[in-house]
Amino acid sequence: MVDISIKNGRILTPKGFVEGSLLIEDGIITSIGEKEGAEHVIDAKGNIVMPGLINAHTHLGMTLFRGYADDLPLKEWLTEHIWPIEAKLTEDDVYAGTLLGCLEMIKSGTTAFADMYIRMNGAAKAVEESGLRGVLSYGMIELGDEERGEKELKIGKEFVKKWNGTSNGRITAMYGPHAPNTCSSEFLMYVREHADEDKVGIHIHASETKAEVEQIKAQCGMSSVKLLDSLNFLGPDVLAAHCIWLSPEDIQILKKKDVKIAHNPTSNMKLASGIAPVPELLEAGITVGLGTDGCASNNTLDMFYEMKMAALLNKVRKLDPTTIPAPKAVEMATVNGARSVGLDTGVIAEGKKADIIIVDMNKPHLTPRHDLISHLVYCTKGSDVSTTIVDGKILMENYQVKIFDEAEVMARAEERAKDLMGC
Ligand SMILES: [Zn+2]
């Protein structure tokens, strides 16, 4: 007997929309459009059945900081507000924050995400419980201190060894050196060696701010990307978040080394970091996924909103409304996102893993329906997602979260935030 059948759907496949049923067996999509009947039948009622969205860059533990210390200069925000609290964070806090983030993702249609943070055993425990797919890394900051670097790498390595490939493969691990200006060249080369040895990828922030690129230029006489390339650090397994301040030469290097990029338009606007040259990156044939970044710089994890921001932001920069059209934004949040974080998902096709969402189109802001792809990018909100399935398991059906008690998750996060910040 087939496990799950979604009937009466408008199924978004790489070839366009297909009307009918979708079957899921043992976590895999086995039929699209034709066959019906299963142990569990979900009636999509003519709504959109599409691949779950992939958040290619976030720090879920930071959901506890949502709305705390907004609208400040980056340096003041980090040194006076975020870092002092992060120093107090326990594994339980990160567990509570990550679980809250997972709940928000399930409810807004994200089925997989790449996370870099601290106290990551707490995060992995939350991902294990949530049913989501997580590509997790321990964020290492070394600041040229050899002793500190040894300690950081030890934690990063233990995390990779403990969690990579667990939860039926739902959890994968990467190394997470924070950025080229918070980790020395020696340390970055050391991380590359260990990533090769353990056969895992690397998640890093790069070229996020003008100040970072200027600092690297003053220290090494070259750009952040060129520096990383000179260390033989770059490769197809590198996920680089932001990549805003790039020269044409940097773009050529990123293409040559097949580096994957996570574009975070809302965070880049909120922190006034700048605008990533996404059209130029796509033109060069580079894989660009989309991310929300942490909750303190966004302040939600809604990937539908992120698609809209990605489609709009570069239109303003280029003064060209044809830049990043809606289908491209959907591609960035699904299939490109999956590729960028090293997953073989993000697409509805027979034989692919069943990471699927249903978007409820029966809403005033989604009426009339001239163009469904346009609606997904410019009108849909995360709260229009009614059903979320990951690895063939139903995490939410008809707006009811099945995997854990929603109220409990929110109450725990509220309590941890109150303890940490007294508000
Ligand atoms: Zn980030």
Image (cartoon, helix red, strand yellow):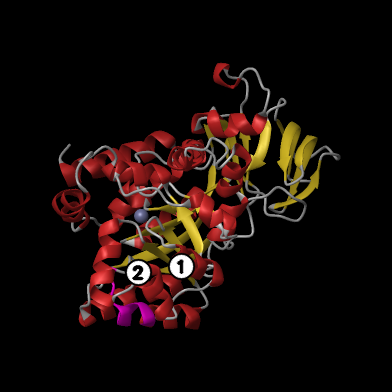
Instruction: Tell me which amino acid carries mark 1.
Output: Glu
Quarter, ligand 1: bottom left
Query: Around disc 1, counting alpha carbons within 10 Å, would you say few (fewer than 14), some (14 to 19), or many (20 or more)?
Result: few
Residue 47, above or below 337: above
**Is ligand 1 closer than 8 angstroms to the Cβ of mark 2?**
no
- Quick check: 389 left or right of 270? right
Q: Quadrant of residue 203?
A: bottom left
How far from the left and from the top, in percent, is residue 362?
62, 20
The residue that appears at 39% across and 56% down in the rendered structure is: 123
Q: Which mark is residue 223?
A: 2
The one of 365 and 320 positioned closer to us in this rendering: 320
Q: Quadrant of residue 338?
A: bottom right
How far from the left and from the top, in percent, is residue 68?
22, 40
Q: What residue range appears in magenta?
A: 181-189
Q: Is residue 286 magenta?
A: no
How far from the left and from the top, in percent, is residue 340?
54, 59
Q: Secondary structure at mark 1?
A: helix
- Quick check: 160 left or right of 92? right
Q: Kindly identify which residue carries mark 1.
A: 249
Residue 3 in sight: yes
The one of 69 and 326 positioned closer to us in this rendering: 326
Q: Are marks 1 and 2 in contact (CB under 8 Å)?
A: yes
Label 1 to label 2: alpha-carbon separation:
10 Å
Q: Earlier in the sequence, mark 1 or mark 2?
A: 2
Residue 94, above or below 327: below
Instruction: Tell me which amino acid carries mark 2.
Output: Ser
Q: Secondary structure at mark 2?
A: loop
The one of 365 and 124 positioned closer to us in this rendering: 365
